[in-house]
Amino acid sequence: MENFGFEEMQCIQRELQERYKHKWEPVCPETGRNKLLWMMIEAGEVADIIKKEGDAAITDDPETRRHFVEELCDVMMYFNDVMLCYGISVEELKNVYLEKHERNMKRW
């Protein structure tokens, strides 16, 4: 997998959601807020590693780095779940992202 992006992430999340659909909340707008809250909790875990281990450990210690990246993956997984819950396509995300980037480039 040369280029790993949102298309691949969305496929993986759909597969995961399908596998555990009998245990997990359904992927729908009503559960989107819960997925967002879980994403924020995971982001807190990322911040915790920065706070407790420090920047040098993240860049220099392979075990700390792996843990840090794993927690970032959790954030991305929940981010993708939020997109799935609200029916946000990769194309829609891309278009709005690029529009936002263009505005930011002219901001100051």
Image (tube, grey):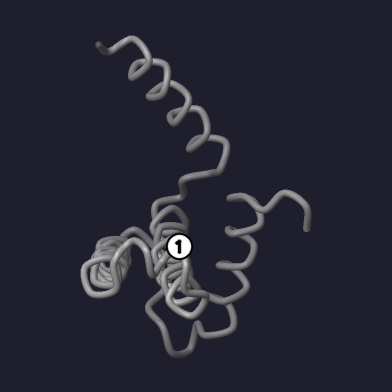
Q: Residue furthest right?
A: 1
- The residue at 66%/57% (across/down) is 8
**Where's residue 92, x and y in %?**
50, 35
The residue to which callout 1 is attached is 59
**Where's residue 9, x and y in %?**
59, 59
Q: Is residue 17 above or below residue 73?
A: below
Q: Nearer the viewer, residue 53 or 69?
A: 53
**Where's residue 21, x and y in %?**
50, 82
Horizontal relation, residue 105 to residue 3: left or right: left
**Which quarter shows the N terminus?**
bottom right
Q: Is residue 83 above or below residue 34?
A: above
Q: Nearer the viewer, residue 65 or 21?
A: 65
Where residue 38 sits, quadrant-wise, is bottom left
- The residue at 64%/62% (across/down) is 11
Q: Nearer the viewer, residue 17 or 66?
A: 66
Q: Amino acid at mark 1?
A: Thr
Horizontal relation, residue 16 to residue 27: left or right: right
* Disc 1 crowd, CA 10 A, few/some/many (<14, 14-19, 20+): few
**Which quarter shows the C terminus?**
top left
- The residue at 31%/67% (across/down) is 46
